[in-house]
Image (cartoon, helix red, strand yellow):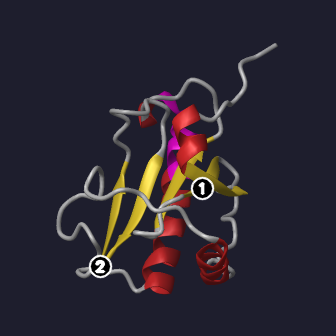
Amino acid sequence: MPDEFILAAELNRDSLWLADWPLCQLRVQNDVNYPWFVLVPRQPGLVETIDLSAADQQQLWFESAHLATFLREQFSAKKLNIAALGNMVPQLHVHHIVRYEEDLAWPAPVWGKHQARAYNEIELARLMQKLDGLNAPEKKY
């Protein structure tokens, strides 16, 4: 049986599934402090973007740009932080964090600044309403 995609335990613990796109699983960090989304390519054993085929690298950036465009418009971001760090969770994943000058960590990075605060039902419903117009991008590459 070929290897199958398994989400890293840390990503599963700290984020909520939103959708499966052509290449990536779209998730939201369970932290109401920041609108913080994660794209995880649904292929086994990926650590770096260069572990993807050339076509899948293009698809990843297409999906990332699709998400970033929506987030900038829908959330009126001052800045979008987009990063694939992987120091703590080596599975390839790309963070998309909406930043505002008044957010808790501004202008510093969000990692380790403040204790994560999980969404309650009302906050999650409010977030889902904002995401209502976010459609999956097409398979482009």
Instruction: Give the image quarter of residue 110.
Output: bottom left
Describe the element under mark 2 as helix, strand or loop. Answer: loop
Describe the element under mark 1 as helix, strand or loop. Answer: strand
Residue 29 pos. (x, y %) = 51, 57
Q: Whole-Å distance between the Cαs marked 2 and 1?
A: 20 Å
Image point 62% across, 82% down: which residue? 126
Whether label 2 touches label 1, CB < 8 Å: no
In depth, the one of 84 and 89 nearer the eye is 89
Q: Which mark is residue 91?
A: none
In which quadrant is the N terminus drawn? top right
Is residue 117 something that shows in the picture?
A: yes
Task: Judge from the rendering whether residue 50 lies leftward or rightward of residue 29; answer left or right.
Answer: left
Is residue 141 something that shows in the picture?
A: no
Q: Is residue 47 magenta?
A: no
Residue 41 pos. (x, y %) = 59, 42
Task: Judge from the rendering whether residue 14 lies leftward or rightward of residue 134; answer left or right.
Answer: left
Q: Indicate the amino acid at tag 1.
A: Arg
Main SS of residues in magenta: helix
Number of callouts in the render? 2
Provide the residue span drawn in magenta: 51-60
In depth, the one of 101 and 14 nearer the eye is 14
| Residue furthest out toward the left | 107
Residue 99 pos. (x, y %) = 32, 73
In depth, the one of 40 and 56 nearer the eye is 40
Query: Around disc 2, counting alpha carbons within 10 Å, would you say few (fewer than 14), some (14 to 19), or many (20 or more)?
Result: some
Q: Relative to 77, does residue 62 appear above or below in the rendering?
A: above
Q: Which mark is residue 100?
A: 2
Task: Judge from the rendering whether residue 95 lies leftward or rightward of residue 16; answer left or right.
Answer: left
| Residue furthest out toward the right | 1
